[in-house]
Image (cartoon, rainbow, N blue to C red):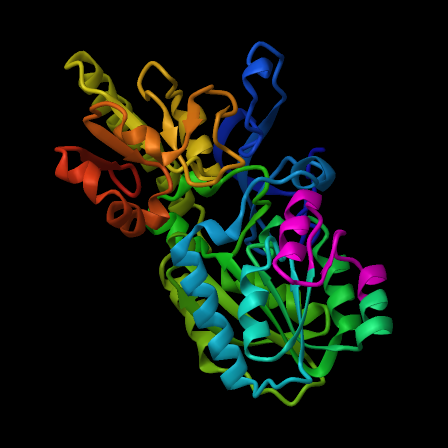
Amino acid sequence: MKNTRCRICKNEHFFNILDMNKMPLANAFLEKKELNDKENYYPLKLVRCESCGLVQIDEIIPPEILFKNYIYVSGTSQALSRHFRDLAAGVVRDFKLNTKSLIIDIGSNDGTLLKVFKKYGCQVIGVEPAENIAKIAKKNGITTVTNFFSGKVAKKIIREHGNAKVITATNVFAHTHDLESMLEGISILLENEGVFIIEVPYLFDLLENLEFDTIYHEHLSYFAVKPLDLFFNKNGFKIINIERVKIHGGSIRIFVSKHSSGFSIDQSVVQLQLQEKSKGFNDNFIYKHFSEKVKSLKINLVKLLASLKKENKKVIGYGAAAKGNTLLNYYQIGPDLIEFIADLNPMKQNKFTPGTHIPVYNTQKIYQEKYDYMLILAWNFTNEIINQQKKFKELGGKFIVPIPDVRVF
């Protein structure tokens, strides 16, 4: 479905930033028997609203296609688990949560975040549309509503459990097309003195670090503070605080409350908007420059991999992440240059990457023979991966990190 209107201000005029042509869905991994079947490809173009400045993609894939059978699991990353522990500890402390506090996590995945809140004695409920992932959460002892969040779901939770003191949505808000409907449900479910906490990848980091591979069909919006502030204000909410966090290559954690609440607005909300303005976020030049640098980066990485191939060096990938599939497809890197990709997630193992058809195996495959280079596709967890792969390094292996520039070490 073509997105002809901005999802925040409804404007119909956009500046084209980066057109990646047609791409397969980033998490549509293939079974071996499906390799000869026709794959579905969808346009992937990044644009910027000429009115409010929201950066977004202009093709909307129905969420039922994207999320009903999902294969991303939060708990496989140690860094993400630590991040969630820190998030929960800060929220419990700053908002004085107790055993009566109800925490709702939208897009709760396998319940990794809610397990931490539960350890603090809080009441927890997850809302997760992916049926296979929701089953994992329930096995982990997390009460989970298997559905897309909506006003109807909010009312059901209130009838059974009451209103929420805290609602979290980490890496969910940017996945949502109808943001106003989502916020209507939040308004129903949240206590008047409650707080809604979202985490989204920060447009600032995407531009500064050339994180073009975070652009894929699940990520509908790429947020700066100014469009978010506009959106919340016109829908009865206010941003009360913003924290920059390192997860996923650079994100912002945004604390939101109802206009009628007693929370005051922290200086961070104004300061970040001033920084964005000084960096040129309101000028299309910075987005044009970003597009040009992404194309140069493609030349550098493909040239390196091709030269290693000529030298008979064996290159493998690590981390069958969605962002990796954006990079592989846009750069047209396939099994001729990458032997295979190793990944800890069993739901991706023994499958093939969408579009490029590179096999994905268990990490044990790394040591079954000698490989020379490891391309870290999940570069946002580079330190964690290198620590896990000390043996690869000891055996003479070298690492390639593709973002924000091509580095070998």
Which residue occupies the foreground of this view, 65 or 297?
A: 65
Q: Is residue 400 above or below residue 355?
A: below
Location of residue 66 in the rendering, given as x and y in whole percent from the top left corner? 66, 38
Q: In this rendering, does residue 107 appear at all?
A: no
Q: Residue at x 54, y 44 (%)?
A: 72
Location of residue 78 in the rendering, given as x and y in whole percent from the top left corner? 39, 56
Question: For the N terminus, which image quadrant?
Answer: top right
Q: Is residue 377 left or right of residue 180?
A: left
Q: Residue at x 63, y 50 (%)?
A: 136
Q: Specify the quadrant of the image occupied by residue 182.
A: bottom right
Q: How many marks?
A: 0
Q: Per the image, is 343 magenta?
A: no
Q: Specify the quadrant of the image occupied by residue 196.
A: bottom right
**For the magenta stretch, what is the residue range?**
127-154
Q: Specify the quadrant of the image occupied by residue 296.
A: top left
Location of residue 247 in the rendering, given as x and y in whole percent from the top left corner? 41, 58
Q: Residue at x 49, y 82 (%)?
A: 266
Q: Per the image, is 146 magenta?
A: yes
Q: Is residue 351 left or right of residue 399?
A: right
Which residue occupies the foreground of this view, 286 or 28?
A: 28
Q: Is residue 58 left or right of residue 378?
A: right
Which residue occupies the foreground of this view, 96 or 73?
A: 73
Q: Residue at x 62, y 40 (%)?
A: 70
Q: Is residue 112 left or right of residue 66?
A: left
Location of residue 113 in the rendering, given as x and y in whole percent from the top left corner? 55, 64
Question: For the C terminus, which image quadrant?
Answer: top left
